[in-house]
Image: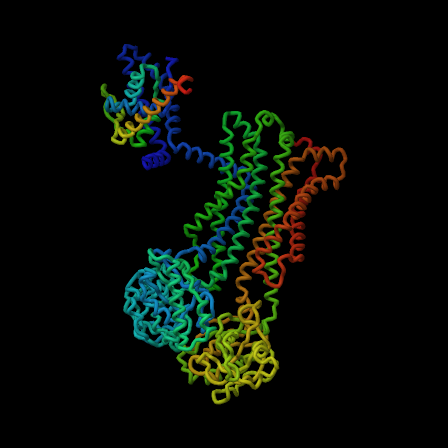
């Protein structure tokens, strides 16, 4: 566990949005597990990092939440993507792809390419 | 999104408990879900719980992270800093009180002057879209004048307005109104009952529609109300008049008021915020149609095509017409109008004069005011002065906080050592400064409210009601708030940087003795520089105030050519008591005989206008029936006076005789002229015996010069002497025969006979009103109002600056002495004489004083040159004023630094050596 990486908050927001888009409404613990699972257990997400992100996304209107019953009938807060969140996700993934492409080009650079 | 964030942020600030409960619930549900998951994966419940707890770590940490995520965490920590700052203030209450008070004085003075400035120069009329209003000229002229010299015009004949009123191409609409208020006598109810006086404003029918001002009740005037002369006895009344004089009668619309004996119907009541377009001493009680002028003013019509210049014009611009185009259109119209007035024969000279006239279209949104032009420069000068006072107060505060920062060095050290960032310490000190500034500002606002009332009372000469208001509007509040912030930054920045530069290593374990010494050098430079700045600025203020006070003194000492004491001036109006011109001479006889007979009265007289008064009657004249060449300035100031006028006022007769009671309606018309008149038109000294004719038809006929009197002043003690002719009032006719002022010269203090004079007038005719009663000293003071305003306030602010500078020097010196306690103690123990110690402390302040004065002299000279135009009888580089200011500042500052120095010599060496 010790070698697992903490996630950058901005990036975590994007991951949360994508997770909610893919899997529909989830409670906090569910989101944390799914993000870890999707990352191949490379990332560590605990409540201290997750909750501020959820709160921020909710304040921005990207997600909405309500109390409900979990699969084992426990009270839990369920988060779901809103329409604004969907738009945000689209825009962010575009951005991310572009950035990733640019960074990838830099990594692939060799001196002879620039000659 | 943004709103959501702000909203939830505020919500969490207001109810932190709820937010915490939510977090806790969320953490619990997370925990439960985690445990569930782990047991499902086969873990023992206890182990699952332990592991889940380890993953989540503490609820408290989650809470901290959540709180830190939103903007409200910053607000929360700022609030914490502010509370800490406030506690810091409470720890040294004495210092905090001095600091808050000096800030309150500084900010209060700024707010007070700014409120008056805002009232007079910035405030917009309370009407719809005032920015689109333009005034024809600046409206600083008022009265009834016959002038038509080249230059900018702001006063017009009614006929000119009639010609441009219909235009809709260049202007959306225009309105005209009298350039002066008129006092009328009003009887409410059905004729009987006592008459009251009201201040009315004659306006054109378009007045309210151009302003787009709506009535509260009833209707406002329409163009129809001024379509025909004398046909529309209707009135719109002010909210105040409605409440105070008509007991807020809900059925007032339709009620009739008897104004100067004619019944006028009230058609509307304006809202409380509406005060018309004049921002002058007194705002109108009623608005009446301009076409009712002859009846209201009880004098000949001013509405005729060849009428005199007496109205102001205000217009609403069309958005699609440029100001330049509207202005050139108005100027062309006006020049054409003047040309047509001249008739068929116009001399080339006159034509040239007319082509030199123009109408500047100025922003009219803030209304018209003659106070504005009179007080603009004084207020701007005072604004700069109070700004400087505030700077001096800031320097004090900066020194005080620097000293505090030095004594809090260990606190800062501890904070930095415990991981606080230096930025955080800067912020902490700046917030403490802000707390001080806001407290000072709040107190200053209260001080300002009270002071502004006094200032306004001065400016409006004690008028019962005025459009000027001491209540701060949003501009004033914004100004005060901005001043607080700028002030806080000004005095907080040096201590803040000083605090953040604290060296962690040395200070924590050093004793105060070495801590003070170790920081020496650059840190002690700032307090010294601040003291020098204070000395420099105070010297500038003292010099400026000195020059202004000497100006006032010179103006007051100026020879005004008449008695300056023991004369009472009474303003009355025989028209209000129903006197027709035929009955006036008999009334005048009765008044003069009755008052002359009062004990303590030397003599009494009557005149059309009061002495020492600006707004005087004037007209061109011709000598011996010979037409004076038009290029010569032939306008002569006129007044109409009764027998005894010169004797009562003490204006010496130089040749011939004064006006006598024998100069009655049947005798040859007599005029007395002043020396300037005689010298200008009769250089050979033979004025007596010649005759003049006066262009103003109100004073028709041939007037014989019977005497020459000494020159006296009229508008201002500093004015250039002008030709003046005094006509015998009993020999005039019609409206010109009315005398509105009674002068009474008394044996002793004129204020003492006031009651008797009032009683005598009431005995003659109870309807004869006393509109105003004042001594000649008060009248004289009125002539130098603006100078009194600026120089007395400047003197006050300069003293305030000086006091602040003294307190500042005292504070810094005391701090230095305390800092050097152990050094001084050692020296004393080693046998240093007291004088040496005294000198070693005093030397520092003397050096600072000397540098401050040396820097201050050139700055003062430059500042004095800037106010040169407002000075009279004193040079801006007046050495006496400068030397006096330097002496004054030196004496005060020496006193301020002597006290701490003496304290240094009284140090007990034993105590000093134990001192920390």
Residue at image coords 41%, 17% = A112
Q: Quadrant of the N terminus of chain B?
A: top left
**Taking the image as drawn, is residue B576 in sight?**
no
Quarter of image, res A15: top left
Give the farthest residue toward the front. Answer: A115
Give the residue displayed 47% in from the left and 48% down from the top.
B480
Say left or right for B18 vs B792. left
Query: Compared to A2, does B275 lie above or below?
Result: below
B759 left or right, relative to B864: left
Q: In this rendering, does residue B253 appear at all?
A: yes
Where is the C terminus of chain B found, in terms of image quarters?
A: top right
Percent of width and height locating residue A67: 25, 27
Foreground residue among B389 and B355: B355
Q: Position of residue B380 (x, y in %)?
A: 51, 55
Identify which residue is drawn at 58% across, 24% down: B505
Residue nearest the observer in this picture, B430 or B526: B526
Residue A105 to residue B363: above or below: above
State whether residue B719 is above or below residue A57.
below
Asked if residue B786 lies left or right of residue B289, the reply is right
- The percent coordinates of residue B144 (x first, y second) are 44, 72
Of residues B765 and B665, which is closer to you in this image? B665
Q: Position of residue B858 (x, y in %)?
A: 63, 50
Query: What residue is shown at x 58% (from left), y 51% (from top)?
Result: B800
> Looking at the image, how many numbered discs can be counted on the residues?
0
């Amino acid at each position: 566990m010790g070698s697992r990486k903490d996630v950058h908050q901005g990036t975590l927001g994007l991951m949360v949005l994508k997770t909610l888009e893919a899997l529909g409404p989830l409670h906090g613990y569910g989101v944390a597990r799914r993000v870890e699972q999707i990352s191949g257990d490379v990332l560590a997400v605990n409540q201290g990092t997750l909750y501020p992100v959820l709160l921020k996304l909710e304040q921005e209107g990207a997600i909405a939440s309500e109390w409900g019953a979990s699969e084992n009938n426990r009270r839990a807060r369920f988060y779901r993507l809103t329409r604004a969140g969907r738009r945000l996700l689209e825009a962010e993934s575009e951005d991310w792809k572009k950035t990733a492409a640019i960074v990838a080009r830099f990594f692939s650079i060799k001196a002879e390419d620039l000659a | 999104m943004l709103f959501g964030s702000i909203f939830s942020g505020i919500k969490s600030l207001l109810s932190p408990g709820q937010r915490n409960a939510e977090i806790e619930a969320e953490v619990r549900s997370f925990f439960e879900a985690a445990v569930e998951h782990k047991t499902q994966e086969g873990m023992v419940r206890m182990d699952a719980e332990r592991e889940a707890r380890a993953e989540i770590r503490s609820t408290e940490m989650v809470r901290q992270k959540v709180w830190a995520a939103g903007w409200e965490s910053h607000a929360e920590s700022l609030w914490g800093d502010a509370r800490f700052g406030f506690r810091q203030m409470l720890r040294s209450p004495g210092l905090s009180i001095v600091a808050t008070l000096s800030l309150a004085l500084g900010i209060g003075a700024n707010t007070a002057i700014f409120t008056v400035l805002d009232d007079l120069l910035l405030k917009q009329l309370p009407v719809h879209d005032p920015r689109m209003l333009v005034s024809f000229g600046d409206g600083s002229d008022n009265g009834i004048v016959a002038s038509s010299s080249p230059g900018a015009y702001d006063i017009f004949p009614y006929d000119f307005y009639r010609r441009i009123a219909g235009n809709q191409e260049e202007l959306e609409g225009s309105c005209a109104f009298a350039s002066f208020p008129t006092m009328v006598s009003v009887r409410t109810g059905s004729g009987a009952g006592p008459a009251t006086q009201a201040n009315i404003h004659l306006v054109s029918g378009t007045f309210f529609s151009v302003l787009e001002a709506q009535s509260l009740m009833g209707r406002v005037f329409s163009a129809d109300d001024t379509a025909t002369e004398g046909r529309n006895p209707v009135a719109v009344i002010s909210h105040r008049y409605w409440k105070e004089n008509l007991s807020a009668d809900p059925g007032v619309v339709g009620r009739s008021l008897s104004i100067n004996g004619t019944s006028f119907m009230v058609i509307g009541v304006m809202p409380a915020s509406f005060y018309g377009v004049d921002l002058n001493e007194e705002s109108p009680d009623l608005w009446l149609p301009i076409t009712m002028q002859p009846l209201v003013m009880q004098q000949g019509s001013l509405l005729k095509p060849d009428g005199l210049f007496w109205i102001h014009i205000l217009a609403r611009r069309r958005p699609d017409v440029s100001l330049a185009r509207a202005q050139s259109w108005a100027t062309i119209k006006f020049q054409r109008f003047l040309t047509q007035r001249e008739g068929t024969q116009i001399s080339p000279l006159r034509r040239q004069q007319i082509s030199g006239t123009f109408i500047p279209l100025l922003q009219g949104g803030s209304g018209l005011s003659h106070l504005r032009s009179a007080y603009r420069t004084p207020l701007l000068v005072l604004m700069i002065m109070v700004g400087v006072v505030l700077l001096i107060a800031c320097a004090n505060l900066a020194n005080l906080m620097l000293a505090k920062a030095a004594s809090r060095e260990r606190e800062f050290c501890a904070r930095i050592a415990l991981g606080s960032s230096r930025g955080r310490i800067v912020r902490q000190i700046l917030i403490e400064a802000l707390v001080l500034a806001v407290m000072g500002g709040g107190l200053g606002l209260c001080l300002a409210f009270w002071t502004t009332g006094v200032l306004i009372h001065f400016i409006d000469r004690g008028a019962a009601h005025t459009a000027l208001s001491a209540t701060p509007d949003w501009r004033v509040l914004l100004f005060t708030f901005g001043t607080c912030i700028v002030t806080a930054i000004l005095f907080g920045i040096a201590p803040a940087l000083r605090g953040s530069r604290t060296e962690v290593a040395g200070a924590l374990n050093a004793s105060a003795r070495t801590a003070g010494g170790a920081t020496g050098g650059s840190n002690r430079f700032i307090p010294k520089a601040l003291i020098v700045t204070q000395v420099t600025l105070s010297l500038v203020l003292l010099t400026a105030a000195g020059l202004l006070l000497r100006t006032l003194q010179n103006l007051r000492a100026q020879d005004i050519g008449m008695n300056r004491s023991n004369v009472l001036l009474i303003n009355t109006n025989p028209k209000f008591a129903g006197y027709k011109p035929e009955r006036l001479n008999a009334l005048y006889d009765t008044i003069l005989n009755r008052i002359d007979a009062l004990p303590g009265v030397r003599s009494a007289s009557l005149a059309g206008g009061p002495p020492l008064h600006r707004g005087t009657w004037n007209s061109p004249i011709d000598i011996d029936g010979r037409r004076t060449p038009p290029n010569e300035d032939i306008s002569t100031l006129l007044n109409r006076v009764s027998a005894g006028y010169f004797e009562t006022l003490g204006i010496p007769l130089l040749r011939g005789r004064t006006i006598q009671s024998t100069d009655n309606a049947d005798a040859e018309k007599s005029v007395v002229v002043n020396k300037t008149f005689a010298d200008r038109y009769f250089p050979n000294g033979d004025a007596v015996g010649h005759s003049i004719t006066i262009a103003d038809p109100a004073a028709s006929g041939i007037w014989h010069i019977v005497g020459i009197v000494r020159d006296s002043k009229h508008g201002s003690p500093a004015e250039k002497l002008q030709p003046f002719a005094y006509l015998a009032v009993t020999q005039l006719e019609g409206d010109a025969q009315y005398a509105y002022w009674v002068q009474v010269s008394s044996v002793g203090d004129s204020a003492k006979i006031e009651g008797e004079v009032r009683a005598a007038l009431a005995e003659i005719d109870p309807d004869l009103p006393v509109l105003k009663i004042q001594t000649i000293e008060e009248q004289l003071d009125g002539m130098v109002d603006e100078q009194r305003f600026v120089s007395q306030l400047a003197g006050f602010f300069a003293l305030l600056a000086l006091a602040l500078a003294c307190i500042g020097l005292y504070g810094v010196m005391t701090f230095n002495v305390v800092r050097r306690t152990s050094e001084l103690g050692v020296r004393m123990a080693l046998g240093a004489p007291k004088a040496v110690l005294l000198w070693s402390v005093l030397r520092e302040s003397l050096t600072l004083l000397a540098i401050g004065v040396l820097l201050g002299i050139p700055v003062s000279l430059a500042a004095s040159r800037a106010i040169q135009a407002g000075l009279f009888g004193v040079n801006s580089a007046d050495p006496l004023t400068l030397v006096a200011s330097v002496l004054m500042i030196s004496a005060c500052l020496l006193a301020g630094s002597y006290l701490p120095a003496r304290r240094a010599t009284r140090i007990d060496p034993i105590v000093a050596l134990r001192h920390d």
